[in-house]
Image (cartoon, helix red, strand yellow):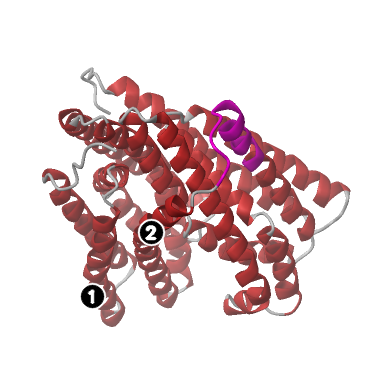
Amino acid sequence: MPVTPHPDDRRILRLAVPAFGALVAEPLFLLTDTVIVGRLPSPALGALGVASTVLSLLVGMCVFLAYGTTASVSRQLGAGDRPRALRQGVDGLWLAAGVGVVIIVVVWPLAPYLVQVLGAEGELARQAVTYLRISLLGVPSMLLVLAGTGVLRGMQDTATPLLVSVGAFALNAVLNGVFVLVLDWGVAGSAWGTVLAQTLAAAVYLAMMFGRYRAPVRPDLAGIRAAGSAGIALVIRTLCLQAVLLIATGAATRMGEEQLEAHTIAFRIWTLLAFALDAIAIAGQAITGHTLGAGDVAGTRAATRRMVAWGIGSGVVLGLAVVAARPLTPGLFDAGPGTAGELLAALWAVALLQPVAGIVFVLDGVLIGAGDQSYLAWAGVWTTLAYLPAAGLVALSGGGLVALWAALGLWMVARMVTLGLRARGDRWLVTGA
């Protein structure tokens, strides 16, 4: 971590620390759901896994509702136009609601086919479809939560999303316990618990927007279209990220069971570490939008340099933590001898890539905050194309897990170069509202 005091440190930490708490809260409480459903007879847990995979993909594609809204709201707030900031926040909420309804209409009839694509059959498929269809009713609320989170981040408030997140996921855990273990509703009870908890969380955000902030309720079609257009570029960026990760998982699967298990554990560790770096990126979204909205180019560059320093420092600390915990990691996951050997080798790559990830995640957040989504989309395409030959070479040459992670490292370095070159230039420094 940077140790020299800096004027931006307090602001970065004020935004990043609560954001980190909110990011970590979700997987912890979802783990509670897994434990509860795991007490049901087979194949309930497998059905939860299959349906959750579909839901995660759908909601993950809509993360632009949070990122894009943060950028637009913070820019208007920095420009001193609070009413317009709230107006754009409301546009994001209406877009979220509309996209949620479309997802229900489209995915509901496709649910049986989607679970079959993931290999579910018989009773497993039946329970997965039940969980998926009930959960679809909560998708509009999930997307409203994403947009509402983006609004508050844009208003320079990451503490409230933390409180809402912890409250919602705690309620989700309680409802799951009651519906599944007490009322014996099976996987349907777990799904209904999630739907009710997400609906309450969405209601809190709506109450804040239309009560506390007194934002206008009526939709602005032009504003909704603008929010949707800006979101397309972020969807392309997200699709590129997902494609790389899916290709890596497919390559590990073809290597063998031990390699797949080791890759799964290594990637879970990578994801956990990413939460800390993503927290700085979220601060970057809010700070960059605000400073550019205020026309403060020098302040934007200074804050960016400091956040990159935090990203590098955090990456070094996390990398050292991986190295220190490396000998104990196979035992924590009860890995067999073959899996343990593969995992220990892959963890070196995970550790070495943390400083690179720190730079990449922070600059990604900064450019999102600047509204530079088009560049991020093109950069996502080009870096994915740089990754594909490396991944193909691993597959054709029969390379092992270390070689696969080396390909992922090449992808991360390509992202660092493309984002770093953009940040060094001036084209992203568009000021004003």
Residue at label 2?
229
Of 74 and 422, nearer the camera is 74
Circle 2: is it few (<14), some (14-19), or many (20+) Cα within 10 Å?
Answer: few
Q: Can residue 246 be seen in this view?
A: yes
Q: What residue type is labelled 1?
A: Pro
Question: Going by the image, does 189 lie left or right of 430?
Answer: right
Percent of width and height locating residue 254: 42, 77
- Residue at position x 19%, y 28% in the image: 299
Q: Residue furthest bottom?
A: 396
SS label for mark 1: helix
Q: Disc count in the image?
A: 2
Circle 1: is it few (<14), some (14-19), or many (20+) Cα within 10 Å?
Answer: few
**Residue 136, label in figure:** none
Quarter of the rendering occupied by the N terminus:
top left
Residue at label 1?
389
Distance of mark 1 from mark 2, alpha carbons? 31 Å
Of 136 and 91, nearer the camera is 91
Q: Quadrant of residue 317?
A: top left
Percent of width and height locating residue 108: 67, 70
Q: Magenta stretch mostly in which secondary structure?
A: helix
Q: Which residue lies furthest to the left in this view?
A: 425
* Magenta-drawn stretch contains 267: no
Report the magenta residues as a range: 202-218
Q: What residue type is labelled 2?
A: Ser
Give whichever of discs 1 and 2 has the lower sequence position.
2
- Relative to 331, residue 11 above or below: above
